[in-house]
Image (cartoon, helix red, strand yellow):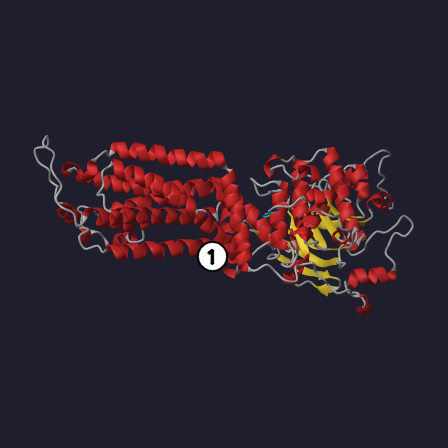
Amino acid sequence: MECDLKTSRRTACRLSADSRIDIEFQDLSYTVPEGRNGSKLILRSVNGRFQSGELSAILGPSGAGKSTLLNVLAGYKVHHATGQVSINGRLRNLKDFGKISRYIMQDDLVQPMLTVQESMMVAANLKLDLNATQQEKCNAIQEILDLLRLTSTVDTRTTELSGGQRKRLSIALELLNNPPVLFLDEPTTGLDDLSCSQCIALLKQIALGGRTVVCSIHTPSASIFSKFDSVYIMSMGQCIYQGFGLDVVFFLSNLDLHCPKHYNPADFIIEVASGEYGNYQEKLVSTIDNGRIKYCEKNDTRLTESERKFSVNGIYAEDDTPEIHSNYPKEKLGWMQQYKILLMRMWVQMWRDKCYMLLRVILHIITGVLIGNVYLGMGVDGSKTLFVFGFYFICLIFFMYIPMMPCLLQFPREFQLIKREHFNKWYRLSAYFAALTTSTLPVHLVLGCIYVMLVYFLTNQPMELNRLSMFYFICMMTAVISESLGLLIASQFSIVNSVFVGPVIAVPFMLLAVYGFGGGYYSIPKWIRIAMYCSYLRYSLEGLIQTMLTGREKLACPEHEEFCIYTDLEYFVKEIGMQDNIIWIDIAALVVIYLIFRGGFYYLLRQRLSPNKTFIALAYVGRLVKAQFAR
Ligand code: ADP
């Protein structure tokens, strides 16, 4: 990750886009299902175009459909959209468009625990050409950080950046492989006036390099409004104006809507769009034909014929059609390299989160000492066999909750980051999945070892290496299965819902693990018996009992006890109905369950990021059900 930015050369080429991309859309509609009435039309046959070399802004009152339009244009939400989006006059191919465009979402989440320079280097390693040298990467980083005025923050952790700096970093990360098209959802939200105008000035500079920069913006100040090369104003899912920002005053005055002197034109048109000056929306929509006509200049109120032809048909003359060249790396990084970079990033983040790591170590030591003392020396006490059984169960519950809870709390947030990085084609999801699976393994092994050693010796379990290692192995299997279950849940729910669903799902697993012990197995209804064998905790418990309580000599009964019923451990195992269990079947079942849960997590994560038709249908049904309940 090393890069001496002070010695990096500044090169000019990176800041100018190699290919010019013009985006045009026609009859774009977007519908979402709503309540019993069926659906809600959010975008209503809108038209428009955004040109390269221009900074374009989508404006409008809240709820006008700005984010929806941006989502559809960026290709982020296309399932309920109809209409046509053309790139340089050709119908958009989403896959190809994904390679040349980047989408910076509103919530400027950045990877925690890394410095600005490290974040940029990770992005450079993942996104730049495989053959790019370290110096070339450093130069690219330096140049972008210069442009976005982040050079003074190179050694600052991302979590310590101000709101404006964080926003600029999220733009810088996406500028690395020089995308010709940049979409930004409300890039100025949450910024103070100065940061706001700095941010827009930077976007303008980026656009001047030949890029197509489109952003949605809520209520810009007059000075910011004047910086846009083109504004696209929306009201109730339709376009009411498209053209140069300040021309809006002349455009409205033609319709007898006079912007008061010293009044911000942006505020004025938004007020008009909100209906504060009467019901002008429909008139405005029809005047510019819902975005088909671009208002140009004071004296030239409409497009020239040829421009209009372009705008209406959305097709360039064949000679004018530029090729789409993307700056996407020619030689892409392989899966293995992506995996290594992501794994390193995860390990660095874990290592830097020292307080959390220390807390986990202390927690394992305290719990180990506590449980070890509660069951002190009972492993060889013939009067305490039932207690030892309870001890095994408690150990499994510990290894169920401890790895699961952090996933439920952390992964929903992490998902938002993956969503952004994956949508912007940083890496393959399988590489991320493999890195995530590997990254937590050493932590489980070390922390699990601390706990197991403490409780094993304090409770005086048999001092045999094979029993100790099998005890440790089963505990570790329980931990990684629980982690997979936690990830599976957290990949589908918000933090609040995950933290509720996770422990609730754990309850039947615990219940089914011990259900029917003590006899009467065959009197248990068949469906419960099937359910019992779906609980991974049951296999873990059976495995521990087989490992620790079979093949041992009779235990001694302490002198102060009159009678010890379970000194013969084989007899105890028979009494609880486990004499027929085969340890290797339990181990095999744990491995299979682990693979199912991990595979399930990967599948559901992939579906959440890019759902197939079944999942789109399920999401649709889910929204309908939700809408019914919301009534
Ligand atoms: P803006 O960005 O202009 O504030 P949005 O594009 O976010 O507006 O939303 C436009 C309208 O569509 C709003 O009224 C919003 O409530 C509605 N909307 C957006 N997404 C959904 C959805 N998934 N279900 C129902 N209504 C939605």
Query: Farthest residue toward the front?
Result: 7
Any part of residue 119 in sight: yes
Query: Farthest residue toward the bottom?
Result: 318
Query: Farthest residue toward the left?
Result: 562
User: Mark 1 = which residue?
Assistant: 603
- Which residue is at 77% across, 50% downward? 207
- Asked if ligand 1 lies within 8 A of label 1, the reply is no
State the residue in front, 120 or 172: 120
Relative side of 23 to 472, left or right? right
State the residue in front, 64 or 418: 418
Q: Quadrant of residue 186?
A: top right
- Which residue is at 70% across, 58% downward? 327
State the residue in front, 23 or 269: 23
Query: Farthest residue toward the top?
Result: 560
Indicate the position of residue 50 as horizontal and vertical percent values: 76, 54
Relative side of 339 to 325, left or right? left
Any part of residue 76 in sight: no
Indicate the position of residue 149 as horizontal and vertical percent values: 73, 40
Relative side of 615 to 168, left or right? left
Indicate the position of residue 120 as horizontal and vertical percent values: 64, 46
Mark 1 closeness class: few <14, some 14–19, many ≥20 residues within 10 Å: some
Indicate the position of residue 405 as horizontal and vertical percent values: 42, 41
- Which residue is at 38% across, 34% downward? 363
- Work out whether 383 lies above or below 311: above
Q: Quadrant of residue 163?
A: top right
State the residue in front, 545 or 445: 445
Relative side of 66 to 313, left or right? left
- What amino acid type should be assigned to the residue bearing mark 1? Tyr
Q: Secondary structure at mark 1?
A: helix
The number of numbered badges drawn on the structure is 1
